[in-house]
Image (spheres, rainbow, N blue to C red):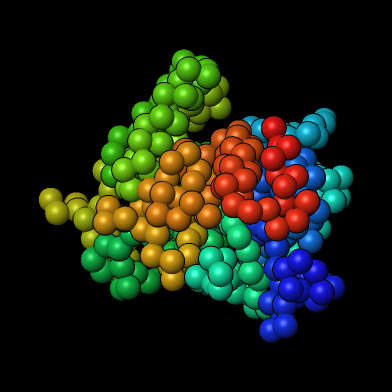
Amino acid sequence: MNDLGDAADGRDVSGVRNVRTVVVGAGQAGLSAGYFLRRAGLRSGTDFVVLDHSPGAGGAWQFRWPSLTYGKAHRVHELPGMPLGDADPDRPSAEVVGEYFARYEREFDLNVRRPVDVTAVREGAAGRLRVETDTGAWSTRTLINATGTWDRPFLPYYPGQETFLGRQLHTAEYRGSAEFAGKHVLVVGGGTSAVQLLMELAEVARTTWLTRRPPVFHSAPFDQEWGRSAVALVEDRVRRGLPPQSVVSVTGLAATDAIRDAQARGVLRPEPVFDRITPHGVAWSDGRALDADVILWATGFRAALDHLAPLKLREPGGGVRLDGSRVVKDPRIHLVGYGPSASTIGANRAGRSAVREIRAFLANRTAESPSERSLERVH
């Protein structure tokens, strides 16, 4: 037995495993958090554990469509402590990032446990949190939630949606343009994914772009000042307990050479979104109608936080109120990769700050062991 009253393998008498911190998710945010926990001197699997429900390394990147090459994808900010190195821009981004994340997990001995589905986080005994999974339960003093959004694609509802005789799919289900050759595809959404898919689909299919608001393209560089301003706007929402907007929704779309060429060819010519869906297409309230074979919803994602529901963290505004990455209602919990940190560079910073906050939280309580006190050394 150890100082927690646990068996030698870290389990208590009921079989629940005890750790200082559970990290849920092994994408950019989760790996960043794991890195800074290791730098604090904590041991993976003993002092903290990283749980990931995906089949392999790579976070959400491993599910991206094969034709999204590394050269076409948003820039991947390197994880802390290890450069990505030279990557072939013509290789699928899923392969490039997946291999990089796998190397990172090995290099820093993060021992990610997968596939593990976290089903619920509840109040546990003695002020601890109980993390329930499909492979057993964990008891932890603190939790870093890094589940991202990929598991919650957002599908808006329009009248008549269930009557459509063609195919409807979300970008999360998209695997390539070949299956849409010769069809008329409606792409609904105003973000980067919609633009990328329109340019790809236009090579083999007829496309129509439909958006709720006119998209804004910026030719000016997205410099650090611009990025800080955008993040500040999103951060303000989560401070007020509102659902976060994506950083991209604030910054607008970058007018690259490829985008300007697509605009000149008429590929990126948005129209107002329809009012209802018909069996053979869509229709507007002014009587206009449009036939289509496919409706491709590029309507984004929502934060995957259902497993935290038992803790009742949401505010009346519908979001989770944060101070930095710390949940205001429960200082044991941090959300990284949420709101202002929902970007690759933001996730790195949030992982670091979350570990700093956890250090401060635990330092205010009686240290249970030397390994817990080692959190004070994180920097």
Task: Please state which of residues 330 and 144 is positioned toward the viewer in this rendering.
Answer: 330
Q: Quadrant of residue 72?
A: top right
Between 218 and 162, the one lying in front of the other is: 218
Residue 333, x across and y down, in percent: 52, 54
Residue 165 sits in which quadrant?
bottom left
The reply, left or right, for residue 121 in relation to residue 99 is left
- Percent x, y for residue 14? 69, 84
Q: Quadrant of the N terminus?
A: bottom right
Decide if residue 23 is on the left or right side of residue 160: right
| Viewer-side residue, 15 vs 31 | 15
Q: Is residue 197 above or below residue 83?
A: below
Residue at left 72%, top 52%?
A: 372
* 211 lies left or right of 110: left
Front-lying residue, 69 or 249: 249
Most extreme residue toward the front, as rendered? Answer: 366
* Residue 198 x, y percent position in the rendering: 49, 42
The residue at 45%/50% (across/down) is 327
Residue at (75, 45) in percent of width and height: 374
**Where does the C terminus fall, quadrant-wise?**
top right
